[in-house]
Image (spheres, rainbow, N blue to C red):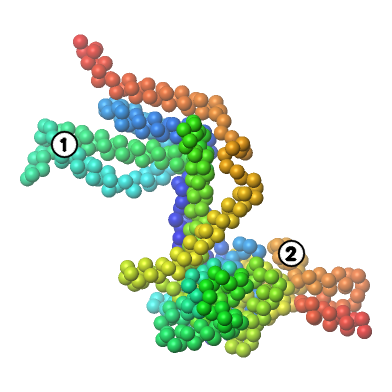
Amino acid sequence: MAIKIEHLNYVYSAGTAFERHALKEINLEIPDGQFIGVIGHTGSGKSTLIQHLNGLLQATSGEVYYNGENIYGEGYDRKQLRSRVGLVFQYPEHQLFETDVFTDVCFGPKNLGLPAEEVEARAYEALKLVGLKEKYYKSSPFELSGGQKRRVAIAGILAMNPEVLILDEPTAGLDPKGRDDILDQVKMLHEERGITVLLVSHSMEDIARYVERIIVMNRGQVMFDDTPREVFHHYRELEEVGLAAPQVTYLMHGLQEAGWDIATDATTVEEAADAIRRFLK
Amino acid sequence: MIREITLGQYYPGNSVIHRLDPRVKLAGTLVFIISLFAFHSVEAYIGATLFLAAVITVSRVPLSFMLRGLKSIFFLMMFTVVFNLFLIKGTPVVSFWIFTITKEGIEMAVSMAIRLIYLVIGSSVMTLTTTPNDLTDGLEKALHPLKKIRVPVHEIAMIMSIALRFIPILLEETDKIMKAQMARGADFESGGLIQKAKSMIPLLVPLFISAFRRANDLAMAMEARGYHGDEGRTKMKPLVYHGRDKMAYLILLGYLVVMFLLNRIGFFAGLWGL
């Protein structure tokens, strides 16, 4: 039960002057129940990669397996796959189209051909999960605030009951509170339902706080694939490809250079505070 | 999927034709088209062919790109040829059942086909060697005198360039929204006509909203940078005629004179015969 990617290659506009090799020889295994962060510079191929996981893009070469089945195989039901691997695009609020919030969330489960009661039950549950107040259910999605719209859009994916949830920069353009709310809810979903989560993000702080594994993409290839602690250990190399480690990594390294006998592998503010406290005792 | 559609026809290059002032190319295309329809002797068609071949060679755009435009007028051309072939009265050549093909009909059909083909290739030369922006710039400058009779030339040119710029943006947006809705189980391919039309709603509503949002943002950005229409507006790269542009005008004039003479060859030949 997992996603497996083998020798995946993807070329944009093959055979024209605009040809671009977006993914090169990707090999990955994503076991069930992991919380994974995907980071990479703009144009590193991370958005292209995640669109292969639910079969939206057809690989130029290579295979993608979901629960052992080849998703490019003949007769494979890719519509079904998309309900199991939920993909929340960047700025998902731009895809809202219905006259009210509740109907919009119903769109996904309705497309799966579920009976009406089941559709409504799922929409209701999904909206509750993202923490939208009930008084908004019947209002137009265009009357809501940016953060609320985004929750509705995420609920639209959750209503399909995915086993894997992929979020492409879910916090872009949100204020700090909106950001924490959404990420905390994703974390809660991960813990309560045990769903696999892939979080694409630019923010090292977010990644370090929530994920247990980081995949670093660079120029269409996997550069690192390890725990946050190990990945941020390579912070100099991350800088070279236009990324950075969390602020605390720099702080800890700075303290060590200043002569403190302190471990530098803290990835969150809490861990760093603990380490400093221990040193000062 | 949608990304594959190429837009605008511009074929990047650095030939003399590419570098010509867009006004010259506009005038040249116009002169060429007029010459096609004003003159109709075999010699004149040979002259036009040579001129077109010379321009294409100099532009260094592959011939296949030039011919691509012909696909879109294929049916129009077939209609014209067939109608001319069968409906023009004159000296019969072949006759079967109720159809009669006349000598005049053949001549007319052939010359109409040549005119249409050259018309398309001639305008392709212009669009392939000029960026859409240059083209609107050239059009604005060329039509400038019309301002005197209150034609909003600048506004029309601005609308044209913004519309052209928005096409790729909206295509990309369509692609994105389509994928996002497909991730929610939407199906844009299967089903009958009504089902298909219905399935477009989740695509069209967000697309319209996004188009209005972008238009609004653009208007704000233009105003914030002090855009106030044509009055007192200067250009970063004003269109100025260079030596090569004057040369091109001279060549055009030469072409017209030669075509005029070629058309009269029959007439002169008659004179010499006396």
Helix, strand or loop at disc 1? loop
User: Going 74% across and 77% down the picture, which residue do you hit?
Assistant: A229
In terms of depth relative to the viewer, which is nearer, A191 or A196?
A191
In terms of depth relative to the viewer, which is nearer, A215 or B145?
B145
Where's residue A67, x and y in %?
A: 51, 83
Q: Is residue B15 visible?
A: no
Q: Which residue is mark 2?
A: A239
| Kind of residue indicated by mark 2 | Glu
Image quadrant where residue B235 sits:
top right
Q: Quadrant of the N terminus of chain A?
A: bottom right
Q: Is circle 2 on the same chain as circle 1?
A: no
Pointer 1 local density, CA inside 10 Å: few below 14, some 14–19, many at least 20: some
User: Going 22% across and 41% down the picture, which residue do you hit?
Assistant: B81
In terms of depth relative to the viewer, which is nearer, A108 or A268?
A108
Q: Which residue is mark 1?
A: B88
* Total numbered labels: 2
In terms of depth relative to the viewer, which is nearer, B209 or B261?
B209
Task: Tell whether label 1 touches label 2 (CB within 8 Å).
Answer: no
Q: Using residue A258 as the reference point, say whether residue B264 is left or right of it.
A: left
Where's residue A176, x and y in %?
A: 71, 72
Residue at the far top in the pictured view:
B274
Q: Is residue B208 visible?
A: yes
| Kind of residue indicated by mark 1 | Ile
